[in-house]
Amino acid sequence: MVSNTPYQPGRTARIFDLSLRIVTVALVVITTIGAFVIAISLAGRGGSYSVPSWLDGAYRVEFDDGRAIAITDGTANTYENFEIGRERDTLTGTVALRAMVEVSRDDRDSRAVVGVIVIAALAATWLAVLSLRAVVASVIAGEPFALANATRLRRLAIAILAVPVIQFVGQQALQRTFDPDLPFVPEIGIGVPSWLMLIVGLGVLALAEPFSEAARLREFEQATI
């Protein structure tokens, strides 16, 4: 017996679609504000702002009680006057000295690079959100294996893979605009490790291929019926 009941999307799909709509509205607001701020910044107006950075190279941190931590090559720590035991054993990893590098109103190069980084990040975010919305919309419409979804997943993967690229290129470009006497490296990121973004992006890219094959098989079956 064939049922004529129309397809009803699941609750999870509807909630996810609503969430993406809210994200889209928030992204519109962020993009509008970002465009306004970038325009003011490139025009040399507004106040200065700070860029989070970390110190690159050898340095030494001294404490009032005579203890000291020396970073010899940016990767190895030397602990001086620390007692052997629990206190010394808990000191692991590399000590990173962070600071805020001020970008003045007259620093057009740094402001331009920051503007390009923000624009690139927003573009990647828009591509990811719009691709996800299109995929969810096709699922709600009862067409999860539409051939277009394979292309949408590829676009989503490109957006995800673009994030670590934007981080690396932006960091290198922004550092070149700093004063050469400042041994600081700017921190550009979203709090997610680059290697994880690469894994997720490649995973989504791999997922697009089964979607593509399933869609082609579905179209072939429909054509032969």
Image (cartoon, rainbow, N blue to C red):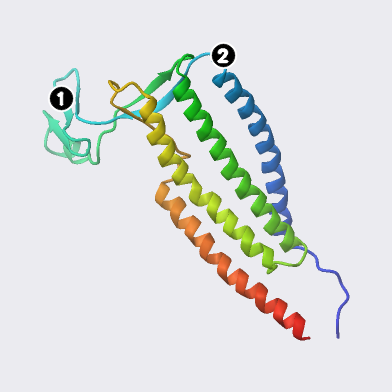
Amino acid type indicated by mark 2: Arg
* Mark 2 surroundings within 10 Å by alpha-carbon count, few (fewer than 14), some (14 through 19), many (20 or more): few
Q: Return the x and y of residue 161 as percentages of the image width and height.
A: 49, 51
Q: Is residue 94 above or below residue 53?
A: below
Instruction: Find residue 45 and name its label.
Output: 2
Image label count: 2
Q: Quadrant of residue 64?
A: top left
Camera-side residue of 27 and 182: 182
Q: Quadrant of residue 68?
A: top left
* Lateral position of residue 131 relative to residue 62, left or right: right
* Lateral position of residue 80 relative to residue 50, left or right: left
Q: Quadrant of residue 63?
A: top left
Q: Return the x and y of residue 8 as percentages of the image width and height.
A: 80, 65
Q: Return the x and y of residue 48 as percentages of the image width and height.
A: 48, 15
* Lateral position of residue 132 relative to residue 140, left or right: left
Question: Which residue is the extreme one toward the right?
Answer: 4
Q: Return the x and y of residue 218 as percentages of the image width and height.
A: 70, 77
State how far apart marks 1 and 2 are (Cα): 45 Å
* Lateral position of residue 6 relative to residue 23, left or right: right
Amino acid type indicated by mark 1: Arg
Q: Residue at the location (67% across, 72% down)? A: 215
Of marks 1 and 2, which one's residue comes earlier in the chain? 2
Q: Residue at the location (56% across, 14% down)? A: 45
**Which of label 1 and label 2 is nearer to you?**
2
Query: Disc 1, disc 2: CB below 8 Å?
Result: no
Q: Quadrant of the N terminus?
A: bottom right
Q: Quadrant of the C terminus?
A: bottom right
Give the labeled residue for mark 1: 67
Indicate the secondary structure of the residue bearing disc 1.
loop
Q: Residue at the location (61% across, 29% down)? A: 34
Indicate the secondary structure of the residue bearing disc 2.
loop
